Structure formats: structure tokens, C-alpha cells
Image: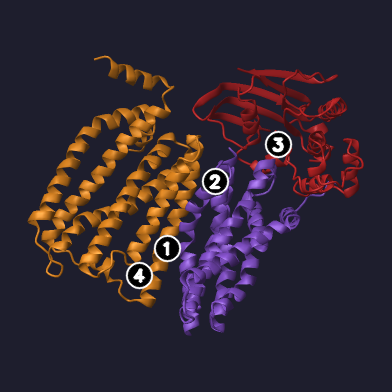
Amino acid sequence: MKAATPLYSALFALLKRDLMLAFRHRAELVNPLIFFLIVVSLFPMGLNPQSQVLPMMGAAVIWVAALLAAMLSLDNMFRSDFDDGTLEQIVLSPWPLPAMVLMKVLAHWLVSGIPLVLLSPLLGVMFNLPAAGIGALVLTLLIGTPVLSLVGAIGVALTVGLRRGGVLLSLLVLPLYIPILIFGAGSVWDAALGSSIQGPLLFLGAILVLALTLAPFAIASAVRISLE
Amino acid sequence: MSMTQTLTDSPILEARQLRCERGERLLFESLSFRVAAGQLLQIEGANGSGKTTLLRALCGLSAPAHGDIIWCNEAIGDNSEDYHAQLTYVGHHPGIKLDLTAFENLRFTQDMSRTKASDTTLLAALDHIGLFGFEYVPCRHLSAGQRRRVALARLLIAQTRLWILDEPFTAIDRAGTQLLAQLLTQHLQNNGLIVLTSHQPIELPGGEITRLALH
Amino acid sequence: MWVWFHKLGSPPYFFRFSGIVLPYLAVACLLSLCIGVYWGLFIAPPDYQQSETVRIMYIHVPAAMFSMSIYIVMALAGAVTLIWRIKLAELIAAASAPIGASYTFIALVTGSLWGRTAWGNTYWEWSDPRLMSELVLFFLYLGYIALYYASEDRRGAARAAAVLALVGLVNIPIIHYSVEWWTSLHQGSTTRGTQIAATVHPSMRYPLFIMMLGFALFYAVTLMKNTRSMLLASERNNAWVKEVVSQHESP
């Protein structure tokens, strides 16, 4: 009973707990995906486009819908823990808070981000995107969705203590999502036209690395402020 | 912290010239006190007098407007991870996930601390706290009193020196109250420290209790 | 120098100091704005390419420049808030936000008008990286203000907003480069923003500098006024505020 627990085992315990909790509400996890699907379909329905216009719209529409769906699912990250007092207990645990919140973001991405990535080829096909475009879509979403989770987590952590945090969260987080949108949607369009997207992919990768290194500290700071 | 160290160390929690505000209202200032091993500090005061704010400041969850909190001659901000390793806080919220079972909640708490405990130890703790037969029930299906007991079971398995408890006697029945009193007494006998708030004055047989009133 | 700076952080001292300095700054601001506007609108020569429309520059350029600088001041004050929890820094950041947002709005409107008359037929040009970055900066300001006023706890709100300002600060270069890169890859017509700073004739330079001074002074004056009133409100329970109020009341 006296052996000390290493950091990674505590991190793994937190990840496991979050995944377990998400799994116990798996019906709710599907909602953002359905939202994703419906929103994406709204655009061609509203515009009544000819088939040549579809791929052009597709890149942007799918990406914007992915942003919105990601934002919808953000609230789960901290709200429940805040309300029942377990977030406090995480802050009071003898481990670095940035590492702990990174695990929560990872759990969120595994549960909410990856399904978006997996659903995207289907949506790409709905918009008549060529294979290169669909490939770019999946790749950019794969790199982009973790950034959406990381940056979104900062916003959630800042607003979790507020009563009407919902719309405020969108105001805070959407402007920060804009660079990812620009590179993501732009890459898909470029790939569909046949050009190389190596540059934008590298830039997206760079944003991901920046977010991975800096966001945990911002999130930890925001969590502490919300708990004061 | 191992059990043998309780006989050689004597940690002290000290507050110096604390000043806390909530919003723009001053709660209290120039508050100083000391709690030594084997002592219990009970903080009394009317609702809104700042008891919870004080406890949270002692945990390091919020920073006081002025003053220092010292644990074993070190400010708690200087080495917060080590301080948290020696602290267990049970606040107003039970601090348990309703979607997990009592056992899973304890398992998680234990995995997040710096000590390892076996499953049998956790089950024994749940038994001791009066939840035999309810270990694998999701906490959502437990009564408020039972959820409180799960929260208090954390004290049983924690190996920490300092317990900070916010109104621990609320929402538990008579048997639970006796059990908790036993737990507290035992902790003091093991040279632990307790800081708690409560509406009614606590009486513990053989316990050294200091009372502090906030106005 | 540092000692004085530290003293400035104390609310009563800042209040006295700003009270003394404010009238002079206000006069200087009024003068420079009037001179600058008159000079820019009437005396300075029209541009050889754009004729009279270039006069928008005298408002657009200072507004755009300071919209960025004020954000940096806000972020720095935020950093001070997070590290040292100085109340005055919190108030300076909160008071700067609406001013910065207004400057950004002015820059957007004048930029759009200028672009329409000088280069194109549209009021808004999505391919212009500077205009796009400025738009996002406007959103960041609005988000900051929304977050600050979302909770009743002023000091906690100030700390939360400080984190947001710092995150936004990191984001600004990213946004700017992402838009710039994208438009340069696609359109190639991004000369709008870059042309301005490149060659400014001396006869146009002086009114521009005076306008910049005017905008800077306007920021300083408005900041001081707003900070003073926020300071009085938040310190109303302290003795020095009661003294100030009683001094004002007795004729």
C-alpha cells in the first residue's frame, strides 16, 4: 500500500474514467454527429445547386459544420465535473494540472472528434468531391479536430463557472477557430483541383504542435480561475 | 506518507494575517491560527461569513487577498503538488461521479493519489462506512446520505495527514454521524490534522478541539 | 523610475496622478486631432493615384495601428493581472477593450470605404488579409468584453478575460499569416494593405503623424477617465474614495 503511483498511471486513470463516463452516455454522443449530418445537408437544400457547384461548396460547408459540431460537444468536457465537485478534486490531486487537462481533452477528441473524421468521407461523397478532395478532407480533419478540442477546451474552461455560458462559448471560440477553417477548407478545395497540399498540411501540423504545447497551460489556468 | 512517519514528524498548518474578499465584500482580515498534529480546528460562523472561502483558500483552490498559508514551513503555493498529496478535501459537493459505482469512484480517487491500494482494501472501506451490498451500484441510485458516505469513504482510504472538511455532518444519519466521529478521533490519534466547519459544536472524546469564529 | 511605476499601481496615487495629468492630455488630444484633421482633409495634397480618396488614410491608418497596439496593452495588463493580481491592471485592461474595439470598427469601416473607392466595387473584400485579420481582431475584442461582463465577480472575470486576451495574442499572427498566405496563393491582389505603408510622401507624413498622436492621446484620455470611474466604483468601500467624494461635495 505504500508504493508510489507514477504520473502516467494517474493520467491513464483519468483518461479511463472519462472514456467510461462517455461510454455510459453513448446515446448522447451521437447527437453532434447527427447535427453534423443535418447541417451539412441544409446548405445544398437551401441553395438548390447544380452538380458542378457542389464540390466547391462541399469543402467549406463540411468544415464549418465540423467546427459547429465540435463546439456543441465541448460543453461535456468540464461542466459535469464542475457541477458535482470532481473538477475540484482533479485540481487538488498531486499531479500537474496541465497534464491532467490534456487527458480530458484527449478523451474528448477520441469520443467526439474522431467520429467526425470517420463520417467525413460519406459527406464528401454527398458533395461529389473527387477522391483527392476526400483524402484531403479526412487528413485535414484528422489534424484539425485535436486543435478544435484543445482550443475549445480553453473556452469551456473559461466559461464553465458561468450560468449562461453556452452562446458566450461560441463567441470566444469561433474566432480562434478561423485559421484552422481557412487551412482546412482551403486544402480540400486545392486538393480537389489537383494541387499539392503539402504546405497547408504542414501549417496545420504546426498549429497542432503549438496548441499541444501551449493550450494545456491556458486550460489549466482557466480551470483554476473558474474554480475560485 | 507512510504510517511510521506519523510518530516522528509533526506537521503544522499555519495561517498568517489572512484576508479574504468575495466580490467586493470583505469577509475577514488579519486572521491567524495554527493547527498542529493531533488537533482539530472547528471554524464557526453564520452563513456567508466566509467559512467555505476560508477552507478553499486553505486547500489552495483560491488565493486570499492578503496573507500566507504555511504547511510544514513552506508556503502552500511553493510546492502545491506535494501539499495536495498530503491533503484530502471533502467540500459541499460529494465529489463523486453519479454515473460510476461507489467502488469505481473510490478506485479512481485512489488511482489519482500517490499511494496504491488493493481492491480488497477499497471494498473493506466501503463495508466499514456502511455501504456493504451497494459497492457496485451506480451512485445515481444511492440516496443523498449514501452518496455522502461514499465521499467520506475517501477519508478512510486516504493516507493524508491533513483533512479539510466542509460541514461533513450534514446529510448523514445518526449512525453515520457516530461513524464519522470515530473516523475523526482515529485520525487525530494517528497525529493527523483536521480543519472543519460545522453548524453544531463538535464533541470528540479525547480530542483536542480549537474553535474559531468568523463574524 | 521603477519605484514611481510601482507607486502608480496604488489606486489613490493613480487617481491623484491621473487627475492632475488629465486636463493637459485632453487639451493636447483635442489640438492634435483638430490640427491633424484640418491638415489632412484640407491642406495636404491629394495622392497622384487616388486623388482625394487617399484622405481616408488619415483616419484609417492611425485607427488600424492603434487597434493592434491597444490589444497588446490589454494582453500585457492581463499578464500583469495573472501574475501579480494588481487591481489597477485589471481595470486598465477592461477599460481599454471598448476603446480598442471602437478603433477596430473605425478601421474596418474606413478600410472598407477606402477599398471600395480606390480599388474595387465591393464594400467588403474577403481576399484582403489585413481586412480579414482586422475583422477577427474585432471578434476577439467583442469576446473579451462579453467574457468580462458575464460574471458578477469583477476580479475573477478580469482574470478569465486576461487568459482570453493572451490566447488571442498568440492567435493574431497565426490569423494574419493564414489569411495572407491563402490570399497570396489564390488571388494575388493583396496590394491594398501593403501599398499604404510603402511610400508616404513627406507632405502627407506630417498630418499622418499628428493624427497618430491624436489617436494615441484620445486613447490615453479615455482610458484614464474610464479607469478613474471604475476605480472609484470598485474601491467605494475604502477610505480614500470617501475622502475624494467628500472633497467634491464641499464647494
Residue farthest to the top, as pictured: C250
Disc number placed over residue C127 in the picture, else none: 4
Quarter that holds the N terminus of chain C: top left
Q: Tell which subunit mark 4 falls on.
A: C
Instruction: Return the residue nearer the eye: B6 or B58.
Output: B58
Q: Are marks 2 and 4 on the same chain?
A: no
Quarter that holds the C terminus of chain C: top left
* Residue A172 drawn at (x, y percent): 48, 52
**For residue A134, side relative to residue A115 (left or right):** left
**Residue at the spot of label 2:** A165
Distance of label 4 from label 1 (alpha carbons): 13 Å
Q: Which chain is orange?
A: C
**For residue C101, side relative to residue B166 (left or right):** left
- Asked whether the beta carbons under mark 2 and mark 4 sit within 8 Å of each other, the answer is no
**Residue at the spot of label 3:** B93
* Residue B75 drawn at (x, y percent): 61, 35
> Helix or strand or loop: what does disc 3 sit on?
loop
Hey, what amino acid is under mark 2? Gly
Q: Is residue A196 visible?
A: no
Distance of label 2 from label 4 (alpha carbons): 33 Å
Hey, what amino acid is under mark 4? Ser
Q: Tell which subunit mark 3 falls on.
A: B
Instruction: Report the residue at 73% width, 58% height from top.
Output: A26
Distance of label 3 from label 2 (alpha carbons): 21 Å
Position above or below: B95 against C19: below
Distance of label 1 from label 2 (alpha carbons): 25 Å
The image quadrant that residue B59 belongs to is top right
**For residue A74, side relative to residue C129 (left or right):** right
Say whether disc 4 or disc 1 marks the residue closer to the N-terminus.
4
Instruction: Report the residue at 36% width, 74% height from top.
Output: C184
**Residue at the spot of label 1:** C175
